[in-house]
């Protein structure tokens, strides 16, 4: 059964869910950060001050009425003044998020803003980012500084707060959270790329090309059947996507999973639903080279189609971004998984294809999976395949763990990979990594 859309929930329920995601995603501390919603009645719902963000319930969320009356069992967040100032500044703002995620705090203390051209979707999701001068937390001056910065550019919906963190707003809480999560992904990606080497940013022309890229125009078909085995795949995809979001391997704005169904028919995630909130009914069926009517399949559907068509042994595909893996994909530094036996057995040697290869050189990309389970697309994503969805997810986890280990090793000392002789022993023992 489809769960209730978060946008249809009571504001207190929405806030409890989102602050839980922020806390459990390692993007704020027990008493740090605050989230608010301005409802159509002019009531502001906001997280309480000094209460454990890891265990907030809807009953803990405070309501501040238009006349200033406070309703609820706690005190409203001490940062209430700048939430109020943002809502007053822009009537289209209906949710505000402020927190101290490590990546964005890093930028706040070096007095810079992350360049969202590091990833193609980030520019559209985050927009240009401002930088507000420091003021005492909870003060009216802080609210003034933040609002003054937002007013400098009508396109600003996110502002880095000097030596403090980040504040951003959205048309609703899902919009605000997607922007928050994507901006933190950008920040961590840039920092990881700098640890490895130097990040390479996309040009305006490259981003425009990506935005305009149209995969093979799939026709739509009506009268869709949903037999029990097909419905089971839909549920499995949703479970894995949520798990990937929980573990920081996907974010609201990016990530695709697909599973082969029958022959070359498969099911794939949609492009117009935030990944955290995907439900079985959102999944798109691709049958006989056509897409289920009334739904928007992932924009990478053509690549999935070609991979399945050319590789009958592949039954699942995950395309995603994680800050560690994208550190390699945006710096161009070789992702050398010859670190521990498991990493190489699962992943083998991983090539990086140039940006937009999935559009410009799709045949070559799809053929690459005949000899390896994973590739990287520069400044775009990683693509992992397997014989089952859980198998693809396992490889993704191994890849992310390996990437994190290599990034942590970079400042610690020289990498000492497994030797060619040891790799050959693994190739023979586990029957993997056969050469072309």
Image (tube, helix red, strand yellow):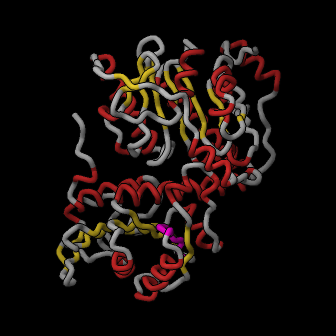
Quarter of the picture holding the N terminus: top left
Q: Examine the rendering and report whether any part of residue 42 can be seen.
A: yes
Side (left or right) of 143 relative to 430:
left
Quarter of the picture holding the C terminus: top right
Where does residue 126 sit, x and y in percent of width and height?
51, 59
Where does residue 123 sit, x and y in percent of width and height?
56, 56
* Frontmost residue, 219 versus 158: 219
* Frontmost residue, 188 versus 124: 124
- Residue drawn at 62 percent across, 42 percent down: 380
Q: Which residues are magenta?
A: 155-161
Where does residue 243 sit, x and y in percent of width and height?
42, 39
Residue 310 located within the stretch drawn in magenta: no
Give above or below for 5 relative to 419: below
- Residue drawn at 78 percent across, 22 percent down: 422
Instruction: Give the quadrant of residue 278.
Output: top left
Where does residue 95 sit, x and y in percent of width and height?
34, 66
- Residue drawn at 45 percent across, 85 percent down: 144
Instruction: Give the quadrant of residue 20.
Output: bottom left
- Residue drawn at 55 percent across, 72 percent down: 130
Instruction: Give the quadrant of residue 169.
Output: bottom left
Q: Examine the rendering and report whether any part of residue 35 can be seen.
A: no
Side (left or right) of 228 relative to 343:
left
* Frontmost residue, 390 versus 152: 152
Give above or below for 61 relative to 211: below
Label tally: 0
């Amino acid at each position: 059964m489809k769960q209730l859309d978060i946008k249809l929930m009571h504001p207190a329920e929405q806030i409890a869910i989102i602050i839980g995601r922020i806390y459990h995603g390692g993007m704020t501390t027990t008493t740090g950060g605050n989230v608010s919603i301005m409802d159509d009645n002019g009531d502001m719902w906001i997280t309480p001050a000094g209460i454990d963000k890891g265990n907030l319930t809807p009953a803990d969320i405070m309501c501040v009425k238009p006349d200033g009356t406070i309703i609820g069992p706690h005190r409203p967040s001490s940062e209430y003044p700048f939430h109020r100032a943002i809502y007053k500044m822009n009537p289209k703002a209906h949710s505000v998020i402020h927190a101290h995620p490590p990546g964005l705090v890093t930028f706040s203390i070096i007095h810079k803003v992350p360049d969202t051209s590091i990833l193609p979707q980030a520019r559209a999701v985050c927009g240009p980012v401002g930088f507000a001068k420091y003021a005492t937390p909870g003060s009216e001056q802080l609210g003034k500084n933040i609002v003054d910065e937002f007013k400098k550019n009508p396109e600003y919906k996110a502002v880095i707060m000097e030596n403090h963190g980040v504040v951003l707003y959205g048309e609703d809480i899902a919009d605000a959270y997607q922007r928050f999560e994507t901006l933190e992904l950008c920040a961590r990606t840039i920092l990881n790329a700098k640890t490895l080497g130097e990040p390479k940013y996309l040009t305006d022309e490259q981003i425009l090309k990506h935005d305009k890229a149209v995969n093979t125009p799939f026709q739509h078909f009506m009268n869709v059947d949903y037999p029990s085995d097909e419905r089971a795949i839909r549920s499995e995809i949703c479970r894995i996507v949520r798990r990937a979001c929980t573990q920081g391997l996907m974010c609201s704005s990016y990530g695709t999973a697909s599973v082969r169904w029958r022959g070359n028919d498969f099911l794939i995630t949609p492009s117009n639903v935030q990944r955290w909130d995907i439900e079985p009914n959102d999944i798109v069926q691709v049958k006989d080279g056509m897409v289920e009517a009334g739904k928007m399949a992932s924009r990478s559907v053509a690549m999935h189609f070609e991979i399945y068509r050319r590789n009958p042994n592949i039954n699942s595909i995950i395309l995603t971004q994680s800050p560690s893996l994208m550190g390699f994909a945006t710096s161009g530094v070789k992702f050398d998984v010859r670190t521990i036996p498991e990493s190489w057995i699962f992943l083998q040697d991983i090539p990086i294809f140039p940006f937009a290869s999935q559009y410009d050189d799709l045949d070559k990309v799809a053929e690459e999976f005949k000899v390896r389970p994973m590739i990287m697309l520069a400044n775009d994503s990683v693509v992992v395949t397997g014989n089952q969805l859980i198998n693809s997810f396992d490889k993704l986890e191994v890849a992310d763990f390996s990437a994190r280990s290599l990034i942590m090793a970079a400042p610690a000392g020289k990498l000492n990979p497994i030797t060619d002789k040891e790799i050959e022993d693994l190739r023979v023992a586990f029957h993997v990594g056969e050469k072309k």
